Image (tube, grey):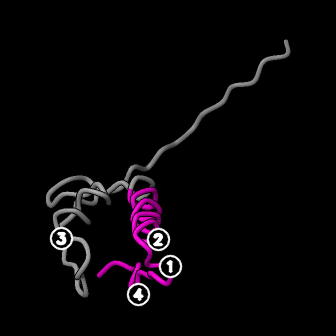
Amino acid sequence: NGTVRLVIYIYEGNQTRVGNINFKGLSVLSPAEVQRILGVETGQALNLYALAEGMDVLKHTYRKLGYLDFQVLNEGID
């Protein structure tokens, strides 16, 4: 009859929330400014796509301020 039965099983897993946010080595922007740019807040669900976009905005912000060698030295998670 030309039809297909499609069944999709989804495992959502546990929701990951932001525990602590720490910044080291800041001198140009304040921790509050960097946190706002990244769009993350303690206790909030972690959205990796939004965080990646925030990291791009942060890099652009520093380069726009003349810090062309700006780097995030630890883009990992503890």
Is disc 4 surrounded by few (<14), some (14 to 19) or many (20+) residues within 10 Å?
Answer: few
Amino acid type of the residue that numbered disc 1 sits on in the rendered structure: Leu
Q: Which mark is residue 31?
A: 3
Left or right of residue 23, residue 51 in this image: right
Sequence-earlier tag: 3 or 1: 3
For label 3, the SS is: helix
For label 2, the SS is: helix
- The quadrant of the picture occupied by the C terminus is bottom left
Q: Magenta segment, which residues?
A: 51-78
Distance from label 3 to label 1 (Cα)? 20 Å
Residue 8 image offset from top left, x and y in percent: 57, 38
Mark 4, mark 3: which one is toward the viewer?
Answer: 3
Most foreground residue, 55 or 4: 55
Q: Is residue 77 visible?
A: yes
Q: Which mark is residue 63?
A: 2
Q: Which mark is residue 73?
A: 4
Sequence-earlier tag: 1 or 2: 2
Asked where in the image residue 43 lies, by quadrant, the reply is bottom left
Amino acid type of the residue that numbered disc 2 sits on in the rendered structure: Arg
Distance from label 3 to label 2 (Cα)? 17 Å
Amino acid type of the residue that numbered disc 3 sits on in the rendered structure: Pro
For label 1, the SS is: loop
Left or right of residue 65, residue 20 in this image: left
Is disc 1 surrounded by few (<14), some (14 to 19) or many (20+) residues within 10 Å?
Answer: few
Distance from label 4 to label 1 (Cα)? 15 Å
Q: Which mark is residue 45?
A: none
Disc 3 + disc 1, Cβ < 8 Å = no
Sequence-earlier tag: 4 or 3: 3
Mark 3, mark 2: which one is toward the viewer?
Answer: 2
